[in-house]
Image (tube, rainbow, N blue to C red):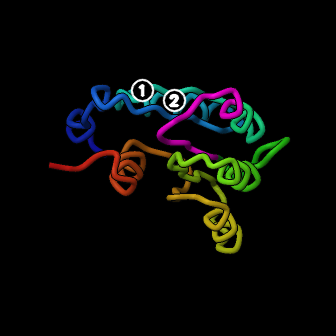
Amino acid sequence: MTREIADEVPNLAESKLTALVVDDNFVNQSMHHKLLDRLGIKNDVVCNGKEAVDVHCSGRNYDLILMDMDMPIMNGIQATKRLREMGIESKIAGVTTRANEVERKEFMEAGLNDFQEKPLTISKLISILIKLDFYVQT
């Protein structure tokens, strides 16, 4: 994305969107957190799927969850299934470096609403937001 296009990215702060970043890699956590911040989306970060489930068990809810697939303790497939079993209706976008079609299919079938390959960029994040009806281009 060019600098000019990036400067025109909407700030969604007025929409009060919230997001949860679920990733065990500090660099990815930081990058995804900053991309969401750049769009004005309030967000929290956890290190694995179990922490994502625990956060929801404590009563927190999010509009969007950016879920990594490969994590210790509870991976993204297990966490997505568990969140869906709990009745969590947040939009969940899987983000992973693995593009294996079988694993991607399993991840989608766990309850994802969208899937993007890492590295997540501002244009990929906007694509997720548009696809999941959080942002409508004018």
Q: Name the residue nearer the viewer: 58 or 102.
A: 58
The amino acid on which the numbered mark 1 sits, given as a three-letter code, is: Asp
Residue at (55% x, 50% y) in the render:
92
- Mark 2 is surrounded, within 10 Å at the Cα level, by few (under 14), some (14 to 19) or many (20 or more) other residues, namely many
Q: Which mark is residue 33?
A: 2
Is residue 58 magenta-colored?
A: yes
Look at the numbered discs 2 and 1 and tell me whether their residues touch, using CB distance below 8 Å: yes
Residue 37 location in percent, x, y? 42, 26
Q: For mark 1, what is the residue?
A: 37
Residue 73 location, quadrant:
top right
Residue at (51% x, 58% y) in the render:
113
Residue 99 location, quadrant:
bottom right
- State how far apart marks 2 and 1 are (Cα): 6 Å
- Mark 1 is surrounded, within 10 Å at the Cα level, by few (under 14), some (14 to 19) or many (20 or more) other residues, namely some
Q: Secondary structure at mark 1?
A: helix
Residue 14 location in percent, x, y? 27, 26
Q: Secondary structure at mark 2?
A: helix
In screen coordinates, is 70 left or right of 44?
right
Is residue 44 magenta-colored?
A: no
